[in-house]
Image (spheres, helix red, strand yellow):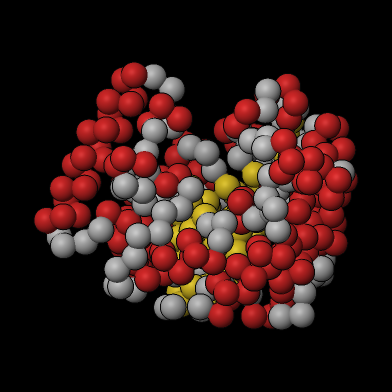
Amino acid sequence: MKRRTFGKTDLNVSELGIGCARIGGIFQNDASGFVRLLGSARDAGINFFDTADMYSQGESEQLLGRAFGRSRNRVMIASKVGYALPARRMVAARLKPLLRPVIRFFGIRRDRLPSGARGALAQDFSGPYVKRAVEGSLRRLRTDYLDILQLHSPPLDVVERGEWLLTLDALKREGKIRYYGIACDTVDVAMAALRYPGVSSIQITLNLLDPRAEAELVPKAEKQGVGIIAREILANGLLAKRAEEIDLAKFCSSAEERTLREGQLAARRREAADAGKTLTRMALDYATGVSGVSVALLGVRSTQQLDGLLKEFHGASASAAVA
């Protein structure tokens, strides 16, 4: 696995990283399988792991702590703060050992839960909340520092006001974070974040179906020495699954969007065939090949998925799909 310098920092990161949103969760049967997955990724040369305090109600961070607590200096850990979990999710987090067997017995699926059962997410980027959230992340990760702390999907007005700067600079001086950045939902937010010299990283969606960040954002970040973390590089599985496996109705909010995606996917499949590649391989090559991208995140749930994608990336044939 090749390594890259992360912007103008002293971090040396693998060109592929692991996005840990799918690590853990009440609907997953075997938490130890995730620990094995994380270890397999590290052994394959991946050293960058991106998580958040809200992923699986903190279990994602806990599992990273289990996997890397004794080998912390071998990995780079980026986490995110800013979302405040509703009370019902916090209760579910504490009751996971009891709820998992019930869920398996009744065959309950995540997508069948009413939205009210999950509770509404709120955001809080105030200094006191961010400091408490960082302390919680450090405990769960079994570490005394984060390589990168990111604000988690702040709205444009929060980024523009810049009230979070004092808190993040203080955490950096205290040694609790090495660098900080922003995980952005839109290019506009990311462009606003680049106005602040202290920002060392931007996380943004970048894939063959959504390349908008490539035109202006990535070149500007590269010029300023800001590392780019590319997420959703396989478009939530659309670029990794066979056509007959995809139900676009689950991904699209309108008939117009569905038609657009069908056309995009058909065109990309033709391009891949003409290039003698699988669509997955072409998607991986694209995300890692954009100049200015420091690390491209894979979202995987199993070692089988990881092995399949790494075989694709390194040129061997594989058919593993990723969600």
**Residue furthest top as drawn:** 255
Q: Does residue 258 sit above or below 174 in this rendering? A: above
Horizontal and vertical percent position of residue 170:
79, 58
Q: Does residue 149 sit above or below 187 in this rendering? A: below
Horizontal and vertical percent position of residue 22:
61, 51
Residue 300 versus residue 157: which sits nearer the camera?
300
**Residue furthest front as drawn:** 105
Residue 260 versus residue 95: which sits nearer the camera?
95
Q: What residue lies at 11% left-to-right and 56% top-to-bottom?
A: 274
Q: Does residue 52 sit above or below 82 in this rendering? A: below
| Among the 4 quarters of the image, the one containing residue 173 | bottom right
| Among the 4 quarters of the image, the one containing residue 139 | bottom right
**Residue furthest left as drawn:** 274
Horizontal and vertical percent position of residue 25:
70, 48
Residue 315 appears left or right of 18: left
Horizontal and vertical percent position of residue 289:
32, 63
Q: Considering the image in quadrants, where does the N terminus appear?
A: bottom left
Residue 314 appears left or right of 6: left
Residue 51 versus residue 125: which sits nearer the camera?
51
Q: What residue lies at 54% left-to-right and 66% top-to-bottom?
A: 303
Residue 182 versus residue 94: which sits nearer the camera?
94
| Among the 4 quarters of the image, the one containing residue 95 | top right
Whether residue 69 is visible:
yes
Q: What residue lies at 73% left-to-right and 22% top-to-bottom?
A: 116
